[in-house]
Image (spheres, rainbow, N blue to C red):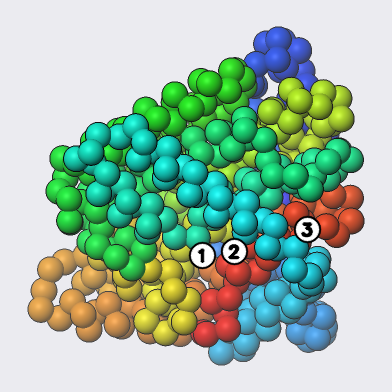
Amino acid sequence: MYKYIKNNELKKSLNLFKRSITITKNQLVKEFLVDLDASCIRSEIFYPIRNLYHPPIDFINKNNPSDALFLKKKKINNWNELNNQEWGKILQNSTKCFRDNIANYIVNDDQDEFMLNENNAQRDLLQSQLLEFIPNEMKDIVKYVFQSEGKLTRQNYLSALVGLLKFAMGVNHSQPIGSDHRMLIHSIQLIHSASLLHDDILDNSEIRRGKKAPYKIFGNKRTILLGDYLFSKSCLNISLIENINAMKCISIIAENLVKGEFSQLNGLGSLIESLNNSKDRKGLVENYFEKYLLKSYYKTASLFSFGGIACSELLKKAYGNKLRMEMIIYSYYMGLNFGLAFQLMDDILDFTNSISQVNSGKPFLNDIKQGILTIPIYFLLLGDQERATKILVNTNVHNSDKAEILKDLVNILFDTNSIQASIVCVAQYLERYIHFINLISKSERNIFSSFLVKMADKLLKIIDDI
């Protein structure tokens, strides 16, 4: 049903991109980048849907030869041809083999310090700039927010991507990124930080990155005002760069964040009601899963993908023809796949934080308590549907046994391999992400490709503890 984007589809994307640029005189192409009408983009986003119905045989073949040979000898192509325990072992082995394989792309040296120093300097500069201009009565909340900024994944990713593209162009990549790129990355980080401030209030989330959510300490009014200020500061920063295409990318990122929030309004209660009234339960679950993946694209992957295009646009302005058009396309797909993997793994952590050693700072079962549907639930619904629906109905109501019901939900997610199948989806997105890194670097290992691959490896650390 859904397949990875192939080379001929990449050419289609590239030709569409070039044609639209010609038509619109160097403006960003709406058909390709905004409306998501291009079939190749939708296929890339929706690829995991096939895993709902069939095991990821291609992924197993590429990463786990011994189990792949077993499946081939037994002529196994469907989930129901092995029991849950057997599939669980195969999926877990395949994901671990994939993680072992990506170690081949990592340069084992001390040059990561270059990237870490650059990113720490950017974080300190951003906070000092905000504190310089913000009113005194807001400085305490700014310090609190930026002291809790986490791992700065988006900032780290975009900084490394700029270095990777410069490496691919054969220009000086050993120097810190320029002021325009720094301003752009700051703008994107500000949008992300602002959205989190507002999200916590909308979702009634009490914890953010292991600490109290800002609104729980400083109140709704000051928190909303700070979010508004960060949005406006981002707009001002990007306008100073004077690059219309980069400005459009930032606008699309901001718009997509809101689209993602809108699509999250239809949660667990809506799905349960629809399941009770539907004669095509599989079709309904697939439809909801598509919406979930689109929501994940809008809320998370869009920032990585359009952030990559914005960074590419600044490089194109600086170096002209040295940045080939396909590099911009590759950076878009890199961001799409990494962003989706990042969001899906964050959603999986909602069910695994009680047993995993990963310090995500995310409360256990927070999403499901809020009625937010995530990837493990969709695999569960296409397994033991009757049992799954019953336990989800109980999860969605308030009663004294809620803790036990949630515990049962986590157990059934593991028993049915819904968690492990979800992790494989993350690995498949990361496999594509690394594929596009190699297309940009022409498979030549370097500090930037290594740093970007290490980001993928860190996402998969959860499998060490499950």
Q: Which residue shows up at 67% across the image and 11% down it? A: 24
Identify residue for label 2. Answer: 426
Say if mark 2 contacts mark 1, CB within 8 Å.
Answer: yes
Identify residue for label 1. Answer: 345
Q: Is residue 113 above or below residue 312?
A: below
Residue 244 picture quarter = top right
Question: Would residue 320 appear left or right of 180 to someone viewing this image?
Answer: right
Amino acid at the residue labelled 2: Val
Q: Is residue 457 visible to the viewer in this orientation of the structure? A: yes
Question: Would residue 63 appear left or right of 421 to someone viewing this image?
Answer: right
- In depth, the one of 409 and 460 nearer the eye is 460
Instruction: Residue 235 in the image: state x and y as whole percent.
Output: 44, 26
Label annotation for residue 447: 3
The numbered mark, 3 or 2, whose residue comes first in the sequence reads 2
Considering the numbered disc 3 on the image, is that residue within a helix, a strand or a loop?
helix
In the displayed orientation, state which residue is furthest to the left. 400
Amino acid at the residue labelled 3: Ile
Considering the numbered disc 2 on the image, is that residue within a helix, a strand or a loop?
helix
Instruction: Residue 460 in the image: state x and y as whole percent.
Output: 60, 71
